[in-house]
Image (cartoon, helix red, strand yellow):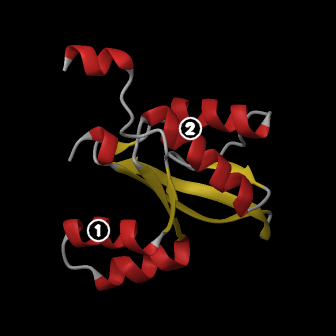
Amino acid sequence: MSLEKSILTIIYGPYQKAGRIEGQEIMSVFNENGLVDETTLDEEYLEVVNHAPGVLEEGAVGPFNDLEVIQKFSFNLCQKLGNHGASLVSLDDYNELLAASYKVEDLKQKLEEKGSFIKNPEAGKSGIFNKIFN
């Protein structure tokens, strides 16, 4: 699978502070190359939300006020990384799919299919230099 056709999988769930739910957080972001590094996540968060992210678990980023902001963050990250699209999967759906999957490949495919898909219209477009040199 080429990077242009790869899908970014984003698992999100409730952000809890002092026992109360205060928005959402992204718990994991990965594609076929593995987890997206925290520096990239933090930079994109700062770009979308206009302030530094909170201190969360390793690999997580947030908090986000609502799902709309997570969608914008995911779309921007997808474009930055050159992925074909992003599949947003809630924590509840992730847990359900994890329990129903017997192989890692099955889980990855189910995550891509079950999540809300955001297409990157820029993926797969080639510039003039690609046409000349390919």
Dot 1: element? helix
Mark drawn on residue 40: none
Q: Is 51 situated above or below 75?
A: above
Residue at 34%, 83% (x, y): give it.
99
Report the mark closest to the observer, 2 or 1: 1
In the rendering, at what x and y percent does residue 6 appear?
32, 48
Q: Which residue is mark 2?
A: 41
Considering depth in this image, is 82 or 108 the residue closer to the camera? 82
- Kind of residue at badge 1: Gln
Q: Earlier in the sequence, mark 2 or mark 1?
A: 2
- Kind of residue at badge 2: Leu
Q: Is 132 situated above or below 103?
A: above
In the rendering, at what x and y percent does residue 127 appear?
39, 23
Considering depth in this image, is 22 or 50 the residue closer to the camera? 50
Q: Is 93 situated above or below 108?
A: below
Mark drawn on residue 109: 1
Q: Is 30 situated above or below 99?
A: above
In the rendering, at what x and y percent does residue 58 appear?
52, 45
Considering depth in this image, is 87 or 102 the residue closer to the camera? 87
Dot 2: element? helix
